[in-house]
Image (tube, helix red, strand yellow):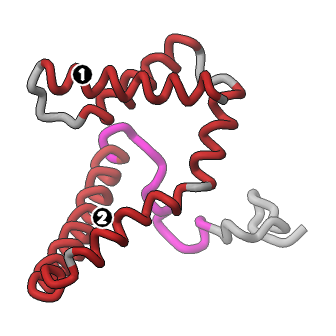
Amino acid sequence: MVGALATLVVCQLIGEIVAHGLHLPLPGPVLGLLLLVAWFAWRGGPDKTMGTTADVILSNLSLLFVPAAVGIVQHGQRFMTQGPAIVAALVGSSALTIAVTAYAFLWADRRFGGKAASPPNEADRGDPFDTDTDKDSGRAS
């Protein structure tokens, strides 16, 4: 577990050094993550220790929200005055992200010939949750 944590921290540190040293507009942790993904690709994926370490970190992820909550309490007056603008920005950016993601998926589906388009009529579709239906005849078996 110590080796896996060291790998995560070293990748983040290298990302920070590269981002600051080359004055890149990307955050260091993002570059560190890309380095980690490249490391996994070169090594054939993460080992069992890294998987266990990641599971432990993710199971305690809620602890990372404590600093955010402290920041909200500390800057309460700012949230009282600028709260509606912050909420509008969050809701608007979330809706825009969902819409762009949906359109990007539809574009990629049409571009690369996926099967996401629905069949021409209802009878051809069938019930995807009906496990007792014979796919060829459409009747229960």
> Dividing the picture into quarters, in which one does residue 15 lie?
top left
Decide which of 43, 21 is in the foreground and name it: 21
Q: Which residue carries the number 2 mark?
A: 98
Disc 1 to disc 2: CB gap under 8 Å: no
Residue at x 32% of width, y 59% of height:
102
Pick whichever, 81 or 26, lies toward us: 81
Across and down, in percent, residue 99 comes to 26, 65
Q: What amino acid type should be assigned to the residue bearing mark 1?
A: Ile
Looking at the rendered structure, the kind of residue marked 2 is: Ile
Mark 1 — residue? Answer: 17
> In the figure, is residue 81 to the left or right of 74?
left
Q: Is residue 14 magenta?
A: no
- Magenta segment's dominant SS is loop
Span colored in magenta: 110-125
Number of numbered callouts drawn: 2
Q: Gap in Å between the C-alphas at discs 1 and 2?
A: 33 Å
Which residue is depicted at the point 52% across and 24% down? Answer: 6
Above or below — where is 9 with respect to 58?
A: above
Mark 1 vs mark 2: which is more N-terminal? Answer: 1
